[in-house]
Image (cartoon, rainbow, N blue to C red):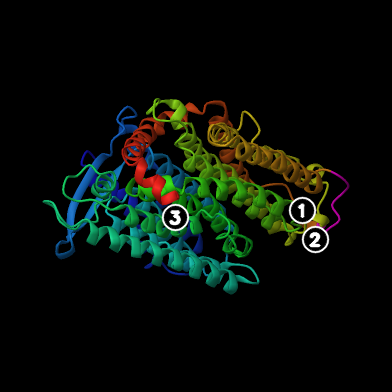
Amino acid sequence: MNDPIILLSAIIFAPAVGALILSVFNKEAEEGMRVFALITTVVTFVLTLMLWNIFDYQDPQMQLQVSVPWIKAWNINYQLGVDGISLPLVLLTSLISLLAMVASWSITKQVKGYLILFLLLETGMLGVFLALDFFLFYVFWEVMLLPMYFLIGIWGGPRKEYAAIKFFLYTLFGGVLMFIALLMFYFGSAGGEVGSTFDILRLQKIGQGLIPGVEFDGMTQMIAFWLLFVGFAIKVPTIPFHTWLPDAHVEAPTPISMILAGVLLKMGGYGILRIAFPICPQGAQAAAYVLVLIGAASIIYGAFAAMAQTDFKRLVAYSSVSHMGYVILGIAVWKVSDGSTVGSDYWNMGMNGAMFQMIGHGISSAGMFFMVGVIYDRVHHRDLNKFGGLMGLMPLYSGLAVGIFFAGLGLPGLCGFWGEAFTVLSAWNYSPILAIIAAAGVILTAGYILWTIQRVYLGPEYKGPHPEAITPINMREFSVALTLLIFAIAFGIYPESVFGMMRESTTLLVTNLSNTVNSGLEFAGNIIQ
């Protein structure tokens, strides 16, 4: 697959092709459909590994770009590409989708429909991370909405309809805001040789003042930035846009919770990095302090909310609100000096920390939700006050679960440590007080994680319902848990495996933002005043 359009298109649409083939299967052949869907996710994962193999770590620019006219009348193109910001998320998506498919063997209701929707969801997610045309990006963003709505609404828990509708409305509202910004950019980009465009790379250059004769003025950037930020922050999610998340997680089946926490939340952070910041640098600079406050507040609020929960799954859901707060914090504090160190690792620490946090949280959160699902499938409850003593009853499961929960805690040597450490260090250069507040989130996280381990895996004997159903972890469950734990340890011991992939692209992004803001500080100051 030497032609980039073939490889990138195959990565995006292999799951959709698999879903189409599944539609002709006999609905009674459930085992055959599961195996075929698993093969499809394996093929997709292998294709992303091929992309990784040919990716040049030293090239910070967009690689393997392809652009084919799609709707000529509106200058909409089928435009794809990959760089150090999108590649780690593409790999994470294919990996978590593969593991979630293995976890989907526990789904026994309407298996055919579930598998088709699952594969369509994977296509939507991969398309978001590879699209370079804003309209195409928006299409993929909306494509993943419907499969997730049905996956929660049909295969979810007792309040599945409520959770699915809430998820749909929140995400749709964010999509509307994004679409308004999209139109602002399209009509505002008129002028010059190309005319109105949805090309994300060209829109970035316009926003950064690199194309003579066409620009987005300061007020346009301010308005568009907040439209985009709210649209993407809903998906992250940050406070006060987070309330859909606990309900969606609690009601979603275990494999969909893995996808939701491991991948979908990262789409919001990616959208901020790919679109909001580089197209609206002046708006991002003017809003920086508010974003830092939102990030720090999300860290603390999410941790306290998690500590207050008695539902095992809801606790993990609120932990995601806290952990994704570090992503907003790290992105927001990219500018920490007067410009004398543009392009250095000092400037880039926050952005790299935010990116690593997305990858690390993708591994640990998917693992935590999976381990909750393993015990829920046996005892059919999630009441933390009715657990206890699982270490003696399920020692292998408990050992794996404790390792994964420690990764979520941020223990040094595991994947959760580096993102939190780098974002807090970078925040110190911006505001020591906010850095101290963010660092306090680490202590709170340790508190609720250790308390959860004590209540569920240690302590007195299990005293909840269905004690006879507590059986050792099976090989399928073991393979998923062990894979996630291995990645958590590998990324924690050798973080360069992630940092090396993204560093050049994040440095280029920070340098471009810095150059643009430094050339327009007078405007930014006027806006803030």
Q: Nearer the viewer, mark 3 or mark 1?
A: 3
Q: Position of residue 157 (x, y in %)?
A: 63, 68
Q: Secondary structure at mark 3?
A: helix
The type of residue carrying mark 3 is Phe
The magenta stretch is 459-467
The residue sitting at 78% across, 48% down in the picture is: 456
Looking at the image, can residue 44 be seen?
A: no
The residue sitting at 20% across, 42% down in the picture is: 3
The residue sitting at 19% across, 51% down in the picture is: 214
Whether 426 is drawn above or below 477: the answer is above
Hey, which residue is sitting farthest left in the picture? 193
Residue at the disc numbered 3? 229
Q: CA distance from mark 2 to mark 3?
A: 46 Å
Residue at the disc numbered 1? 470
Q: Residues within 10 Å of mark 1 (few under 14, many from 20)?
A: some
Residue at the disc numbered 2? 466
Q: CA distance from mark 1 to mark 2?
A: 7 Å
Cβ atoms under marks 1 and 2 closer than 8 Å: yes
The type of residue carrying mark 1 is Ile
Q: On the rendered structure, is 213 left or right of 137?
A: left
Is residue 245 inside the magenta stretch? no
